[in-house]
Image: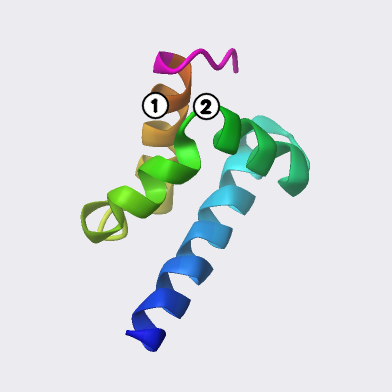
Amino acid sequence: MKHKSANIINWVVVCINEFARNWKLTPKAAFQYLQANGGIGFLTEHYEAEHLLSIDDTVDDLSIICRNNGGNL
């Protein structure tokens, strides 16, 4: 289980950094936005499906989830 948790954490960090790059945010600002608008919860809850997609698809999904939860990017 420890190995799986490390994989999830590493993947979430990659997703945050790619989201930041896509929206021209700092990683800290991206994390705060994703945390406030349900993106981090979405990533951890749906890891099993989302990690099989491309990072670009995951960033698109994060954008939709956050918009649906009140985000304005």
Q: Residues within 10 Å of mark 1 (few under 14, many from 20)?
A: some
The magenta segment is 68-73
Q: Are marks 1 and 2 in contact (CB under 8 Å)?
A: yes
Q: Residues within 10 Å of mark 2 (few under 14, many from 20)?
A: many
Residue 66 inside the magenta-drawn segment? no
Q: Position of residue 64 (x, y in %)?
A: 39, 23
Q: Which numbered disc covers residue 37? A: 2
In front of the other: 3 or 72: 3
Image quadrant in which you'd find residue 65 = top left
Amino acid at dot 1: Ile
Q: How many marks?
A: 2
Q: Is residue 2 left or right of residue 24?
A: left
Identify the residue at horizontal 40%, vertical 15% (top origin): 68
Q: Is residue 4 left or right of residue 24?
A: left
Element on which disc 2 rests: loop
Amino acid at dot 2: Asn
Q: Is residue 44 left or right of residue 50?
A: right
Q: Quadrant for the C terminus, please.
A: top right
Q: Which numbered disc covers residue 36? A: none
- Asked if residue 61 is positioned above or below residue 27 in the image, the reply reads above
Q: Position of residue 32 (x, y in %)?
A: 68, 37
Identify the residue at horizontal 40%, vertical 86% (top origin): 2
Q: Main secondary structure of the magenta part?
A: loop
- Asked if residue 24 is positioned above or below residue 70 in the image, the reply reads below
Identify the residue at horizontal 61%, vertical 37% (top origin): 22
In front of the other: 40 or 60: 40
Q: Position of residue 12 (x, y in %)?
A: 50, 58
Element on which disc 1 rests: helix
- Asked if residue 48 is positioned above or below residue 20 in the image, the reply reads below
Q: Earlier in the sequence, mark 1 or mark 2?
A: 2
Q: Which numbered disc covers residue 65? A: 1
Q: Quadrant for the N terminus, please.
A: bottom left
